[in-house]
Image (spheres, rainbow, N blue to C red):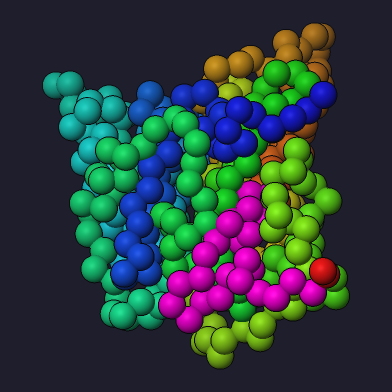
Amino acid sequence: MEKPGKYNAVTDVAGLRVGHYTDREAVTGLTVILCPEGAVTGVDVRGSAPGTRETDLLDPVNLVEKAQAVVLSGGSVYGLAVADGVVRWLSEKGFGFPLEDRFVAPIVPAAVLYDLGRGPAFIPPIDPQWGKTACEAADDGPVATGTVGAGTGALSGGLKGGLGTASIVLESGITVGAIVAVNADGTVVNPKTGRPWEIGLEMENEFKEQGSRFVRVPPRPGAAPVQNTTIGVLATDAKLSKSQATKVAQMAHDGLARAIRPAHTMFDGDTLFCMATGRRDLPDPRGFFTLPQAQAVSDIGHAAADCLARAIIRGVLDAESIGAMQAFRDLENLHL
């Protein structure tokens, strides 16, 4: 029977570590997903206002297959600077694409969300050192969620957004995980029911008491367009090619579109990465066609979509109010 992993987090995927840097005073932060030995990585960008780094490199036709980390950050275009700190940290440890004379080029794709103006300074004091600090804090255990890391300054459809994670172990033994920063133009909560759109995907009471609440979503603030974006990483311990990892990232966007409505708008920069650590083989194909392997990739993609939807819900339910952004947990419960 399918069930969440030990931590119900992306770190249930063997080989991954997660670290955060959170600046609650500046109301922003970042999250780094580390795989120093390298993970085959694909990406799919569906929003029309993305802020990204190294995504072209992940095209299956291009040379490099593995990334040593993926960064999710607040700070919009300024937030891309934190990836430099991650590159430096990995380089100092000797992890990266091998170059001559034992030098390495760490591959660190990144995506950013728009949280400018949500703290005391419109542009937060983002520094590459933040990335190094997040790497030093990374581990393979439980992952903090809510108003932390890349979810610190997130806002979602009038509610405080946040960072969420989830995992599932398939009947095949393959593990799939998701981690996501929810800063969407759309809403995670169905205004007709007062509950998250995809609440029915809950596994083992993961949403706890917040999952039983019914709320009225406040009107969204009068923000200008292009101040949104949901960014995340799907991961699996399966052995995937770069094209297969890209396919999983594509399929995972279905979970985003079910959990956030509307999604992939002109004002979002929705970007999803897929990291495959290669600890488990896919089924061995028999005969001329590779249908068993194709089915396994489809199963992983389907699980990734559901996992991402659950992670999105957790990001919003676990968030705490900060500044003028009101959290789901602080709204009146209309079902008493």
Q: Total label count?
A: 0
Q: Measuring 26% from the left and 53% from the top, which residue is drawn there?
A: 130
Residue 89 in sight: yes
Q: Measuring 21% from the left and 51% from the top, which residue is drawn there?
A: 129
Find residue 273 and report its image quarter: top right
Q: Measuring 43% from the left and 39% from the top, which residue is drawn there?
A: 18
Please tell me which residue lies in front, 289 or 81: 81
Q: Residue furthest bottom?
A: 222
Find residue 82 and report its image quarter: bottom left
Looking at the image, residue 293 lies above or below residue 258: above
**Residue 90 picture location, percent across and down:** 26, 34
Q: Measuring 62% from the left and 83% from the top, which residue is drawn there?
A: 220
Residue 231 in sight: no
- Tell me if 220 is positioned left or right of 325 in this view: right
Please tell me which residue lies in front, 262 or 180: 180
Q: Is residue 311 magenta?
A: yes
- Tell me if 262 is positioned left or right of 18 in this view: right
| Quarter of the figure that contains the C terminus | bottom right
**Residue 51 picture location, percent across and down:** 44, 63
What stretch of residues is rendered in magenta?
A: 310-334
- Tell me if 159 is positioned left or right of 86 in this view: right
Please tell me which residue lies in front, 227 or 62: 227
**Residue 331 picture location, percent across and down:** 66, 74
Q: Is residue 275 magenta?
A: no
| Quarter of the figure that contains the N terminus | top right
**Residue 70 picture location, percent across and down:** 42, 43
Q: Residue furthest left?
A: 101
Find residue 119 and report its image quarter: bottom left
